[in-house]
Amino acid sequence: MKKSLSEKELLNKQYIVPALYRGLKVIELLSEHSEGLSIGDMAELKFPPASLYRMLMTLLERKYVVREGNDLYRLSRKILSLGYKAIDESGILEKSLSAMRKLRDVCGETVLIAVRHGNEGVVLEEVVSSHPVKVTVQVGHHFPLHTAAPGKAMLAYLPEEEKQSVINAISYTVFNSKTITDMSAMELELARVKESGVAFDRGEEIEEIRCVGAPVFNYLDYPVAAIWISGPSSRMPEKIMKTYAALVKEYAGEISVKFL
């Protein structure tokens, strides 16, 4: 077995730039704390305080970090923009936002878009509901595929071999009595999604939240993303969800056309 190098050994390697290596460690630590950290909170990095301060000032200057008050630092949305460029090779957001805003204006609920990253979904953007009480999800949030409407929407239309590989690898975490708990149940659910063109989340992770999603396809008819609406169960009973399903499918189709 190949021995793992210690940090000191890594920094002594010929092509490693120590300052860049340490700067990336700062970014990685901040990514785990969306609430922000003070310099004192970053003591686990074991960097000299003066060096850590200079790194943070550099990240501030380049707008990768924002400072709140005098002592809290957190990552900015500029970091997310880099992630978008890595994930969003086809300009999904640019093609989607107009339709997402129209869908939000029609239904009044929050509209979101996500892509699949391995065995999880990742939220790329949201257009927030006009209601005083609304569902909002942090951009960059990772969600389980087996409970989420967008996850099901994307999985249902994957090529068969790829779909089987993903649903075999999913960890079917149980959140409540409505959660899909195994591969067989997931296959039945995905068959229903593919037949109707829309997917539902009837409180399968968070009982008070309902979602309706549909896939976005590229020119190869591959599900590159999914859009969905999300709202509280009090405003989205079953009858309303079925009404919204046609709208979500329509606007997902409007986005897909832009890939042709």
Image (tube, helix red, strand yellow):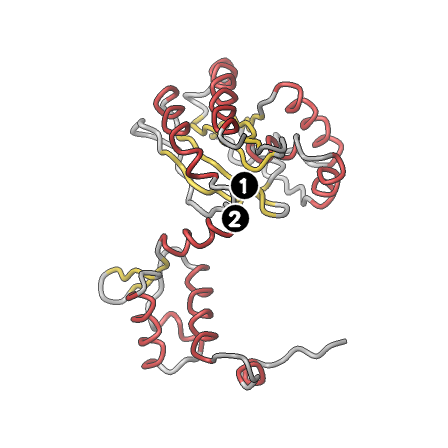
> Which tag, 1 or 2, sits closer to the chain's start?
2
Q: Is residue 100 above or below residue 73?
A: above
Near mark 2 (Cα within 10 A), the count class, few <14, some 14-19 or many ≥20, is some
Q: Residue at x 76, y 32 (%)?
A: 184
Q: How would you rate the neighbour count of disc 1 (Cα within 10 Å): few for under 14, some for 14-19, many for 20 or more?
A: many
Q: Is residue 142 above or below residue 260?
A: below
How many numbered callouts?
A: 2
Q: Position of residue 109 (x, y in %)?
A: 39, 26
Q: Is residue 111 left or right of residue 182?
A: left
* Residue 81 or residue 49, whichever sits in front: 81
Residue that mark 2 sits on:
87
Of residues 152 and 44, which is closer to you in this image?
Answer: 152
Marks 1 and 2, how far apart at CA:
8 Å
Q: Is residue 44 visible?
A: no
Image quarter (top left, top right, bottom left or bottom right) of the N terminus: bottom right
Q: Nearer the viewer, mark 1 or mark 2?
A: 2
- Which residue type does callout 1 highlight? Val
Circle 2 SS class: helix
Q: Residue at x 46, y 70 (%)?
A: 25
Dot 2 amino acid type: Ile
Which quadrant of the rendered structure holds the C terminus?
Answer: top right
Single out the residue that lies furthest toward the left: 69
Q: Whole-percent x and y of residue 182?
A: 72, 36
Q: Are marks 1 and 2 in contact (CB under 8 Å)?
A: yes
Direction from residue 161 to residue 112 in the image, left or right: left
Q: Would you say residue 70 is visible in this rendering? A: yes
Q: Is residue 102 above or below residue 72?
A: above
Secondary structure at badge 1 equals strand
Q: Which residue is mark 1?
A: 115
Residue 55, image quadrant? bottom left
Residue 113 image point, x, y percent:
47, 36
